[in-house]
Every structure is written in structure tokens, then in C-alpha cells.
């Protein structure tokens, strides 16, 4: 178990797809997400994301840990967002496979997601 | 026939609505509308943003569809989603993989067959639900669809009741057996005839689930049926005036009724009602007769009570005999039957229906059920008017599509919300727990031996899976960052409505199936003849069940 990392996620406005900030822009796949060791650069990306109002909805920062060499969202909710519904492994991003997807699927333990908390706060 | 046919005003309204939403979506995508401005507009068209994509909730007014509509839903699921839909406890259908840019085209496609997503979200009067056997049940006091259609016309875009303190749900039942969960609705209406044969409604108010569940209270035993709309207006006005808008968790009418007391609330309603101009608000007899005519046109043929084809098939095919015993119910007309089509094959997500399955059910409805399909609040479908002679054919087609599981109201006929697999608000998953339980009890003989046992699962306290009224209710909770499940027993959403009581500490996900197994074993060990699980629980209380689940306390 390593120290906590951070990533920035949102839903894409035009289709609702889950996206992650990567070094080259917004990417659909969690394995492409840029990981931040400190919270300040993640907050800066978040601020920029909030300004992209015609591209993104509800950006927020998620916590990530390393499982071996692979990044994995710490919260169960964020793992489901990164993969797709657990009841349909053939649907969503998990269908593309790969080592990071496998690491996320194996990950155990759930933590409260900042995404859900902010959603409830906004209601 | 099949469903109430919309007139030109309805058709124009749906087209206008779709056109308006196309403009709103376009302005959102261009940036002319902010998300905060757009969100209430998309919600008024049933469009939510969930975990993986947008979710579109399509209204199925009082759970009634014809084959053209069901075929259209199948086509939408193929073209705009991933080839399936999810029928909900409000008898609507949800598509979970929708793109915002496609939503206007979908509304257009729905409008062409008289469907829409109006009043499937927001703080308005939501889709009214009713008995899925309406027009087919022998014991109904009147056809509840007539009144549901009247409520639909009255409530759609009602200017006074579009921004209520909170959402508002109405159910109408007309039979002794309540298949609508009327007592846990904001308003439950039970049609019945008094000693003189006059038609009226028992009016129940203030029921509901969610984080503060209540069983509705009767505020009027017999409201003359023709006064329905003015009385509903009076209730809604009192609620609109006094319901709390300062706290979302206390905004439902159930909290108002509980805080005032049912008697005081009833007095306020009666007083408001007396002040209203009933003649202006109540449905004119001629309009009621017009609506009634639309449902009375079902042309049943005179047929013998007994069908040799049906009886012969039961003798020769044990699987058909079991299906007939479990899922086929008596019809009001001789020679016809009500066929329950479960969306609960072992291992399948409850309520999910593939496009292929929708098309098969639509075809069967067109050929064999007067073009009529119903959706139940238990997330199943119904072919309400099938000739006994046609049952073997219908069964064979259903069986080939995995739609003939003989488990109506049995342990594997589970209600489950979408849960954390899709829902942005969920704490835990609900569907995998339902799948595991259904697989454990997949043996139809075992399920039938256990008898009626209604399990209902919610992935969070919002209780979309109706766990409070499950004979066994299962609520997913986030416990120290892990998925845990709290079990409650003794609930019922039927005519013997009751809220379940929590059995004990929440269990880890891996222990839920064994706990249900233990509860069933405990019941089988002590039940009396003809006693359902619920009856045994009510007779003995929680102790034998608590012992069964928590005997080994260190596992809890």
C-alpha cells in the first residue's frame, strides 16, 4: 500500500461519459489519468475543469492508491465509474481490459467518494 | 386497442415538448445555458446524469403499453442505448446509457407512439400507478385505468402543482388484493362500492418509503368517485401551502401528515375542499364517459370456461403446468387468463429486459393479448387478456426468450433498485445481491415449497427498492467504507401493509445469501400449513429468525 494520489474526473457534457484528466487532455480511460502526489496541482486542474462548462459536468478530485504498480481509485463508487457496471462486465470501459482494469476489478475495500458527497451537498 | 389513444391535443403537446427540449439541449451544448439552468429542464424530461452516462426515464402511464409502444422502446434501446432497458418500481422504463445529444431524437421517437418522459422527475405529480390486472381482475370495483387517465390529464403540466415541495406519487387500486402498494404512496386511492352500490374512493394520504417510512392514513372512507379531482386538488393545495420547503428530507407530504396528525390534516383538506368550485374542477360526466369508452372497447369473445387445449398441455408438460400454476391467474371473462411474464430469470438483473425480449412480448401482446402489455411495480410484465387455448403457445415463446420463470411472488421474484452499478446516489450495489439470492433459490420446486416470500432490496436509504415493505427487506449501507446490508423482516406493501423491523446488525455482502437461507430454513421449521413467511413472522416475532441469522454472533 502506498501513499494517496489524486486524479480529476468529470462526466462529459454531450454524452455523460466518465472522463479523467490526462497529460494530453480529457481521456475516457482511467489508466490514462494523470496522477498527482500533492493536492494543489489537482485543485488547479479542477479549477480549470470547472471553467470548461460546455465540455464537462460535475468535475471533482478522487483519491487513488497504487496496487503494486497499478493505480486504483480508493472508493468503490469511483472504481465502478472507472470500469462500468459490475453486473455487466461486457459493458463500459472494463470491456477494453488491460492490467489496470484487472487491478481495479481485484481491488477490495470501499471509501466514501467525494463525488457522492458533493452530489448530496448540492441537492 | 391496448392503451388509451391520445387525441390531437395530446399528440401536439408531446411534439411541442420534444421540440422545446431540442432547443434547450442545443442551448446547453452551445453554452447559452449553464448546467445549473439546464439541470431542472432536463430533469423535467426525465433525463438524469448517472455514474456512466445519462439515464432517460420514460413514463409508462399507469403501466400500460401496446405492442407499437413496446416495439418502439426496443428500437430505442438498440439505437440509442445498449440493447436493453430497466423496468422500475414506478412501472416506468429507464435507459442507462443515453447521450445528451441524442435525447431530443429519442423524445421525438417516443412522441410518435404516444410516449414521453413527462413527470418522471422533479417535484411534480409523478406517473400514477395502478393494478397491472386492471380490466382483467374479476373482483375490481371499477376499471382503475379510467381514473388514472383522468388523473393523467388533470395533473400533466398542472400549473399549480408543478413546483411542489417535493415529488408526489399516487396509486389507484380497485381490488381486494392491493397490487399497487397504495398504502405507501403520497396518496393511495382504493376504489370500492358502498352498501348501496355507489362507487367511491377510500383516500389514504401520507404513506411513503425513503429515510422516514410511513404507512398512509385513511382520511376519507368513501369519497364519491365523481368528486375525485376536486378532492385531489384540495389535498395538493394543503400540501403545497404547508409542506416544508426548507428541508428536503422533511418535504414529503408524509412528514406533514405525521406532524399535523391525520385528523387535523383531514380537517384542513375537507375545509379546503368545501371552498372549491367542484363543478369547475371535477371531471364532467361526458368526459368521464368518453375515457371509460376507451377502455370498455376490449372485445372479449364468448368462450367456454374450460379449455381442453390448456388442460391437456398441463397434463403433458410439467414445466407448463408449473408456469400455469404459478404465473397464470384467473380472468374476469370465461376462457381467458392473466399471464405474468417475469423479468426475474435466475441470475438476471431484476427488471432488465433486452430489446429481443421486448419484441417477443410485444408480438405476443399483439397476437394473443388484445395488444395490451402491463408493467408491474414488482418489475415484471403482464399479458392481461390471453385465451386459455393460446396459453401453451404463449408459454413456449416466453420460455424460449427466458421469460417463463415460474416464480411470481416467490423468493426469487425480487425487487431491486439499480444500486451502485448505475445510480449516482447509491451507497451499495443491490442487483448482485438479488442475483445471488435468485440463483440460490433457482430450483423451482424449492422456491414453490417456500411459497410466497417477497424480498425487496435498496442500495441506499432512498428506498427505490421498497425494502421497508419487503417480507424480507435488504438495505445497503456504507459501514466503515464497506458494502454492508441491513435486513428487516415483516414488511408488506399489499393490503396488509406494514413496515419491516430491523433484525439486527448489518451483514457483509458475503453473508447476505446465507442469512436469507437461514431465515427460510427457520421459517420452514416452524410454519403452520398455508402460512406464508410473513404470517409466521407475525405469529412468532423476530426471535427464531434472529437466532437463525445471528446465532454465531462473532460473524455478525
Image (cartoon, rainbow, N blue to C red):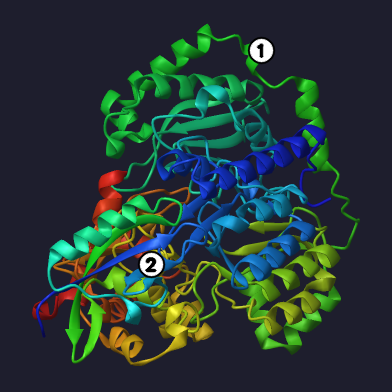
Closer to the camera in the image, B486 or B55: B55
Vertical arrangement, residue B244 with respect to residue B473, above or below: above
Location of residue B322 (image quadrant) = bottom right
Residue drawn at point x = 43 percent, y = 45 percent: B35
- Image side of residue A21 versus residue B412, left or right: left
Q: Residues within 10 Å of mark 1 (few under 14, many from 20)?
A: few
What residue is drawn where x is 22% and y is 76%?
Answer: B548
The C terminus of chain B - image quarter:
bottom left
The numbered mark 1 sits on a residue in which chain?
B
Above-or-below relation of B38 to B365:
above
**Label 1: which secondary element:** helix
- Report helix, strand or loop for mark 2: helix
The image position of residue B71, as x and y in percent, is 75, 64
What is the distance, in whole Å, between disc 1 and disc 2 at their CAs?
Answer: 49 Å
Image side of residue B505 versus residue B352, left or right: left
Q: Which mark is residue B533?
A: 2
Q: Position of residue B379 (x, y in %)?
A: 54, 62
Q: Residue at x 75, y 53 (%)?
A: B332
- N-term mark: 1 or 2: 1
Q: Does residue B306 appear in the picture of this structure? A: yes
Q: How many neighbours does mark 2 have within 10 angstroms: few (below 14), some (14-19), or many (20 or more)?
A: many
Are tags 1 and 2 found on a single chain? yes
Residue B280 badge:
1
Q: Residue furthest front?
A: A24
Q: Using the image, name the chain to which the residue with label 2 belongs.
A: B
Location of residue B177 in the rendering, given as x and y in whole percent from the top left corner: 55, 50
- Vertical side of B500 occupied by B274: above or below: above
Residue at the right extreme of this rendering: B302
For residue B516, what is the image quadrant? bottom left
Q: Position of residue B373 (x, y in %)?
A: 71, 59
Q: Kindly report which numbered mark, 1 or 2, lies closer to the viewer in this rendering.
A: 1
Name the residue rendered at 69%, 67% in the picture. B74
Amino acid at each position: 500500500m502506498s501513499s494517496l494520489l489524486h486524479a480529476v474526473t468529470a462526466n462529459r457534457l454531450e454524452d455523460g461519459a466518465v472522463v479523467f484528466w490526462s497529460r494530453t487532455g480529457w481521456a475516457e480511460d482511467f489508466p490514462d489519468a494523470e496522477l498527482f502526489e500533492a493536492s494543489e496541482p489537482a485543485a488547479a486542474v479542477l479549477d480549470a475543469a470547472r471553467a470548461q462548462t460546455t465540455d464537462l459536468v460535475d468535475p471533482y478530485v478522487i483519491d487513488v492508491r497504487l496496487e503494486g504498480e497499478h493505480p486504483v481509485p480508493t472508493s468503490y463508487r469511483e472504481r465502478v465509474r472507472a470500469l462500468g457496471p459490475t453486473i455487466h462486465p461486457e459493458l463500459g470501459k472494463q470491456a477494453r481490459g488491460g492490467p489496470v482494469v484487472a487491478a481495479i476489478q481485484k481491488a477490495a475495500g470501499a471509501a466514501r467518494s467525494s463525488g457522492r458527497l458533493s452530489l448530496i451537498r448540492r441537492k | 386497442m391496448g392503451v388509451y389513444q391520445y387525441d390531437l391535443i395530446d399528440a401536439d403537446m408531446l411534439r411541442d415538448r420534444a421540440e422545446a427540449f431540442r432547443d434547450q439541449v442545443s442551448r446547453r451544448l452551445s453554452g447559452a445555458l449553464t448546467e445549473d439552468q439546464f439541470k431542472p429542464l432536463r430533469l423535467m424530461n426525465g433525463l438524469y446524469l448517472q455514474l456512466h452516462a445519462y439515464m432517460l426515464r420514460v413514463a409508462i402511464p399507469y403501466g400500460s403499453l401496446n405492442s407499437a409502444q413496446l416495439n418502439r422502446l426496443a428500437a430505442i434501446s438498440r439505437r440509442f442505448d445498449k440493447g436493453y432497458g430497466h423496468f422500475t418500481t414506478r412501472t416506468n422504463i429507464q435507459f442507462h446509457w443515453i447521450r445528451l445529444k441524442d435525447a431530443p431524437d429519442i423524445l421525438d421517437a417516443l412522441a410518435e407512439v404516444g410516449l414521453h418522459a413527462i413527470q418522471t422527475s422533479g417535484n411534480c405529480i409523478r406517473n400514477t400507478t395502478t393494478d397491472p390486472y386492471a380490466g382483467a381482475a374479476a373482483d375490481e370495483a371499477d376499471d382503475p385505468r379510467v381514473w388514472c387517465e383522468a388523473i393523467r390529464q388533470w395533473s400533466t403540466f398542472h400549473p399549480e402543482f408543478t413546483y411542489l415541495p417535493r415529488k408526489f406519487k399516487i396509486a389507484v387500486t380497485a381490488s381486494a388484493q392491493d397490487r399497487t402498494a397504495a398504502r405507501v404512496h403520497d396518496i393511495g386511492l382504493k376504489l370500492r362500492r358502498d352498501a348501496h352500490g355507489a362507487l367511491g374512493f377510500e383516500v389514504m394520504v401520507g404513506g411513503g418509503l425513503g429515510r422516514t417510512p410511513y404507512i398512509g392514513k385513511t382520511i376519507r372512507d368513501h369519497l364519491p368517485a365523481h368528486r375525485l379531482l376536486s378532492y385531489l386538488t384540495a389535498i395538493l393545495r394543503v400540501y403545497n401551502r404547508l409542506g416544508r420547503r426548507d428541508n428536503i428530507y422533511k418535504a414529503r407530504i408524509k412528514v406533514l401528515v405525521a406532524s399535523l396528525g391525520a385528523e387535523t390534516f383531514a380537517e384542513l383538506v375537507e375545509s379546503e375542499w368545501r371552498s372549491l368550485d367542484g363543478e369547475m374542477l371535477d371531471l364532467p360526466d361526458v368526459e368521464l364517459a368518453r375515457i371509460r369508452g376507451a377502455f370498455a372497447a376490449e372485445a372479449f369473445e364468448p368462450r367456454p370456461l374450460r379449455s381442453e387445449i390448456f388442460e391437456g398441455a398441463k397434463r403433458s408438460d410439467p414445466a407448463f403446468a408449473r408456469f400455469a400454476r404459478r404465473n397464470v391467474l384467473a380472468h374476469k371473462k370465461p376462457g381467458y387468463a392473466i399471464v405474468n411474464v417475469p423479468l426475474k430469470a435466475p441470475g438476471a438483473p431484476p427488471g432488465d429486459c433486452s430489446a429481443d425480449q421486448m419484441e417477443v412480448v410485444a408480438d405476443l401482446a399483439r397476437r394473443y393479448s388484445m395488444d395490451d402489455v402491463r408493467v408491474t411495480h414488482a418489475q415484471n410484465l403482464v399479458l392481461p387478456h390471453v385465451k386459455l387455448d393460446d396459453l401453451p403457445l404463449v408459454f413456449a415463446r416466453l420460455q424460449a426468450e427466458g421469460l417463463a420463470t415460474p416464480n411470481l411472488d416467490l423468493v426469487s421474484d425480487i425487487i431491486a433498485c439499480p444500486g451502485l452499478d448505475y445510480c449516482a446516489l447509491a451507497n451499495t450495489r443491490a442487483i448482485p445481491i438479488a442475483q445471488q439470492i435468485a440463483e440460490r433459490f433457482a430450483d423451482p420446486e424449492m422456491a414453490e415449497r417456500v411459497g410466497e416470500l417477497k424480498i425487496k432490496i435498496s442500495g441506499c436509504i432512498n428506498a427505490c427498492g421498497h425494502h421497508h415493505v419487503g417480507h424480507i427487506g435488504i438495505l445497503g449501507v456504507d459501514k466503515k467504507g464497506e458494502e454492508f446490508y441491513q435486513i428487516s423482516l415483516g414488511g408488506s406493501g399489499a393490503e396488509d401493509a406494514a413496515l419491516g423491523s430491523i433484525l439486527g446488525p448489518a451483514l457483509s455482502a458475503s453473508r447476505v445469501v446465507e442469512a436469507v437461507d437461514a431465515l427460510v430454513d427457520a421459517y420452514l421449521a416452524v410454519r403452520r400449513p398455508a402460512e406464508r413467511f410473513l404470517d409466521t413472522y407475525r405469529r412468532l416475532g423476530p426471535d427464531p429468525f434472529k437466532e437463525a441469522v445471528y446465532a454465531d454472533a462473532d460473524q455478525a
